[in-house]
Amino acid sequence: MEIMDGKALAKSIRENLKLEVEELKKQGKIPKLAVILVGNDKASQIYVRNKSKVCMELGIEYEEILLEETIKMQELLDIIDSLNNREDIKGILLQSPIPKHLDINEAFRRIKPEKDIDGFNPVSVGKLCLNQDTFVSCTPFGILKLLEAYGVEIDGKDAVVIGRSNIVGKPMALSLLNKNATVTVCHSHTKNLSEITKKADILVVAIGKKHFVTADMVKTGAVVIDVGINRTDEGLFGDVDFENVKEKASYITPVPGGVGPMTIAMLMTNLVKATKNS
Ligand code: NDP
């Protein structure tokens, strides 16, 4: 069994990006990220702070747009439009969740596909579905990079994804399908879940329930990717019962230190790509 070290891989990706950013700057192409944060969600504030730190580390310019909880939809759309129209801004990120009275799908739709480094615009998702070049949602993109770095073959494998959210499960399933895996997507209505997971060569778990996947649900030799982030008083836990599942897996990601650090590295990868394309 090998533990997939997302922290180390993310670090080496960031180091390479830093060099690319220097090169781009020499050509007069300055990467700049705009992050929109609406309201006072504590977790979002932490995520945004982490993104700003990584930008600083890589020499990427960063602008934060802090909006009141009470902002109207039209005002939010106007702000997105103004960022869309600014030449200096190469990537736009709307931190979710946003307050309930706002329509997040409309907001994501408004972000220009060329600046949609999160890959949440329907155009980006549609291109992923059609297996065309696009910005892929950063968590699935990071998982693909991890699999690639550890030499995990995807072609022809049985892949099972638990979770079908727009930001993780669905783009993950599409990405694995594009790499020629035979993909099964499970969710809260799935019957006989463990019968399905036991067939998986590659099992991706993204549901948000601490230690939901137990050793009896996993085939010996499976590659197990744990996306879950469950914060409890005892600390941070994944969706997979790591200690027991690792005895059966061939490769497994830890939480923390697996998928999490990859997500932000891929966001920066997408930003550098958007800058190159601009
Ligand atoms: P969502 O809550 O949007 O989706 C959860 C999915 O899990 C849904 O599709 C749901 O099914 C499914 N599900 C819930 N319970 C069960 C069950 N008992 N059996 C089978 N399926 C179930 O979550 P996200 O996709 O946004 O995130 C999932 C986890 O990943 C969270 O812990 C989140 O914090 C973490 N995360 C981690 C990231 C990282 O960088 N490491 C990035 C993004 C998320 P249904 O659709 O039927 O409701």
Image: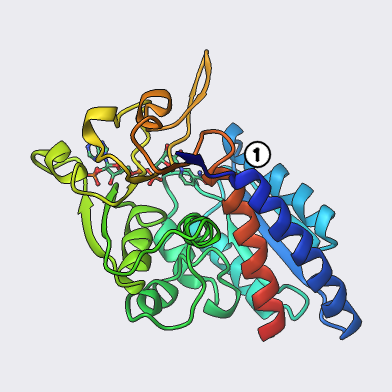
Q: Residue at x 67, y 47 (%)?
A: 8
Q: Residues within 10 Å of mark 1 (few under 14, many from 20)?
A: some
Pick whichever, 73 or 31, lies toward us: 31
Q: How many discs mark residues in the rendered view?
A: 1
Q: Residue 29 at x, y = what percent?
A: 82, 81
| Residue at mark 1 | 45
Q: Residue at x 53, y 61 (%)?
A: 145
Residue located farthest toward the top when viewing the structure as drawn: 234
Q: Quadrant of residue 21?
A: bottom right
- Name the quadrant of the N terminus: top left
Q: Amino acid at mark 1?
A: Gln
Residue located farthest toward the left when viewing the structure as drawn: 191
Q: Residue at x 30, y 72 (%)?
A: 180
Q: Is mark 1 within 8 Å of ligand 1?
A: no
Establish if 152 lies above or below 135. above
Q: Quadrant of ligand 1?
A: top left
Q: How is the image coloured?
A: rainbow
Pick whichever, 52 or 185, lies toward us: 185
**Can you see residue 142?**
yes
Q: Residue 175 at x, y = what percent?
A: 38, 67
198 relative position to 96: left or right: left
- Name the quadrant of the C terminus: bottom right
Establish if 209 lies above or below 152. above
Q: Residue at x 67, y 69 (%)?
A: 271
Q: Residue 132 at x, y = what percent?
A: 41, 83
Pick whichever, 134 or 46, lies toward us: 134
149 relative position to 181: left or right: right
